[in-house]
Each structure stands twice: as structure tokens, then as C-alpha cells.
Image (tube, grey):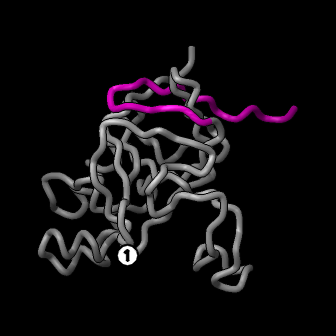
Amino acid sequence: MALVVSVTGLFVAGGKDFVTSPVDRLDLDLDGIAGDLHVGPTRKSGAREPWHPRGTIIRNDRQLSILGDEDLAEIARGLGLSTLPATWVGANMTLSGHDHLSALPPMTRLMAASGATLAITGYNAPCRQSGRAIAVRSGDATHEFGFVKAAKGRRGLVAYVERAGAIAVGDALTVIEPRLAG
């Protein structure tokens, strides 16, 4: 029996800032989310790709940021917050139903009934930029560095759109883990 998770939130980073705003539905195409900061088939390399000079054009394997509600709750507890809004850390999607979503392996697929399929490319390591956004919104400067520690192993995942389609809040996504060679 396949694992199924529920879409509890959808978000778009509509400006130059990675902080997102809630929406009811995402119409995904192979470039990602139209109008989102991370849309497109390519992106510029950064600190996560030290083997390329910064600014090198590379394939965009980070079209979406996905977090688990359970992981967000743990991070909030670690920061002493009652909740941590997914919008503060640039999430495009929140899911419920997996105790440790951040541990899903690369190339796991998340498939909606519409056929929309997201391919997980990896873990989204916590960074000071997200910590700074939390610190500004919470009014607690210690959250800038505290986030990196509190979010270790729970920061969520990044993915690209493998198959276009719509995903709405409340949808169920089937988790398809990669097959091992053998």
C-alpha cells in the first residue's frame, strides 16, 4: 500500500523576496509555478554548488520548496515559538501525514490525482536567510542563527515539476519512493 500525504498549504513567492503568500491552487507546468521567484528551467548557481563559479546557469532542480507540518512544528518548538508559518521560510507546499518528510530520499515522487508529479531532488538545508526572515517577523534576533540549529534534519525538500498539472489545498499526494537497482 502506497503512502499518501495531504496538501495542507500552497504558497507562491511573487516578489523578489523568497517569503511566500498562500494560494488555494498551483497550476504547475514544467517550469514550475508561474509567477514564483523560483520558476524556470534554469537558475544561477550559488553557495550550494561550490563546484561551479557563482552565477553559472544550471538546471533548476529547486522549483519548489516542500515542508512537512510535523517538521515545522518541531522547528517551532526548537525556536520557542507556538507556530512557524511556512510563508516565513519560503515554502511552496506544506504536507501532513509523514512524521519526517525531510528524510524522503532524492528522486521520490509526489503524485496528485491530476497527474501532476513532483520529483524530489534533495534535502533543503537550513540557512541564515530563512533564519533572518524568522527573526524579523518574530522580533527575536536569536532566531537568525537559532533556525539553522532547530531546523537541522527538518528543513524540508526541494523538487522540480516532472509532469504538469494542478495541485489544490486538500489534495492527496501519493508518495512513490525510488526503486533500488538490483
Disc 1 marks which amino acid? Gln
Q: Tell whether position 146 is magenta.
A: no
**SS of the residue at dot 1?**
helix
- Magenta segment range? 164-182
Quadrant housing residue 40: bottom right
In the image shown, does 121 or 171 lie closer to the viewer? 171
The image shows residue 79 at horizontal and vertical percentages of 22, 64
In the image shown, does 12 or 74 lie closer to the viewer? 12
Q: Quadrant of the C terminus?
A: top right
The image shows residue 147 at horizontal and vertical percentages of 31, 69
The image shows residue 137 at horizontal and vertical percentages of 17, 70
Q: Which residue is mark 1?
A: 129
**In this rendering, position of residue 127 left or right of residue 110:** left
**In this rendering, position of residue 96 left or right of residue 63:** left
Q: Residue furthest bottom?
A: 53
Taking the spot 47% from the left edge, 38% from the top edge, the residue there is 27
**In this rendering, position of residue 45 left or right of residue 145:** right
The image shows residue 57 at horizontal and vertical percentages of 70, 74
Taking the spot 31% from the left edge, 40% from the top edge, the residue there is 9
Say above or below: 50 vs 173: below
Q: Tell whether position 176 is magenta.
A: yes
Taking the spot 62% from the left edge, 29% from the top edge, the residue there is 176
Taking the spot 55% from the left edge, 49% from the top edge, the residue there is 32
Say above or below: 50 vs 42: below
Q: Quadrant of the N terminus?
A: top right
**In this rendering, position of residue 1 left or right of residue 80:** right
Crowd band around label 1 with a 10 angstrom C-alpha radius: few (<14), some (14–19), many (20+)? some
